[in-house]
Image: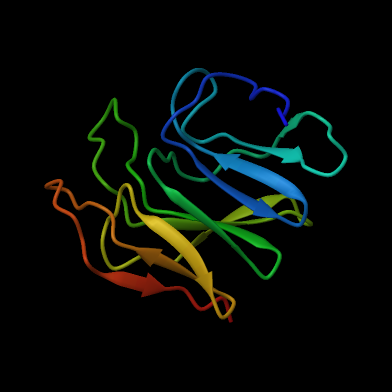
Amino acid sequence: EALAPLPGRRYGHSAVALDGWLYVCGGLGGEPSLRDAIRFDAFAGGGWEALPPMPAPRLDAAAAAAGGLLYVCGGAGNPKASGHPVSSASRYDPLAERWEMLPPMSAGRAGLGMATLAGCPCALGGADRSGQGLKTAERFDPQ
């Protein structure tokens, strides 16, 4: 079954489902990009809705949902500048409709994976500044 098309072309974004919504964050492909976030109501079959912009630009970041909140971390910053992997992390609260920055990860990671384990978002692998794959993983405890 086809969904409503994204508002614009996009690649290098992260996506996650949370409480019946499909969230898409960052990436490139048109304007706006990198800091924008949108969501789609998967149950009502509506269209895409713009969210407040993320606090930091992200390309090839990862996202996970835990405790009713959306977590986005890592990725590369603005590719028109350095484009290096970033260690920053942020969290979106859909009820408060606001983003907040979280403590950074121990290393910058682009192209990483994320999953939730026992209610905690985990960042897995990715590439470092030299483009080498990482074998490390980190867990964020939201408590």
Q: Is residue 47 left or right of residue 26?
A: right
Q: Position of residue 18 (x, y in %)?
A: 69, 55
Question: How many numbered dots are placed on residues in this image?
Answer: 0
Q: Is residue 82 above or below residue 138?
A: above
Pick the front one: 85 or 132:
132
Q: Is residue 11 above or below residue 15?
A: above
| Residue drawn at the location 19% of the way across and 53% of the way down | 128
Res 104 seen here: no
Q: Position of residue 26 (x, y in %)?
A: 49, 37
Q: Is residue 74 left or right of residue 142?
A: left
Q: Is residue 44 left or right of residue 3?
A: right
Q: Residue furthest right?
A: 44
Q: Position of residue 6 (x, y in %)?
A: 63, 25
Q: In the rendered view, how is the structure colored?
A: rainbow
Q: Quadrant of the C terminus?
A: bottom right
Q: Position of residue 22 (x, y in %)?
A: 68, 44
Q: Residue furthest front?
A: 1
| Residue drawn at the location 64% of the way across and 44% of the way down | 23
Res 21 seen here: yes
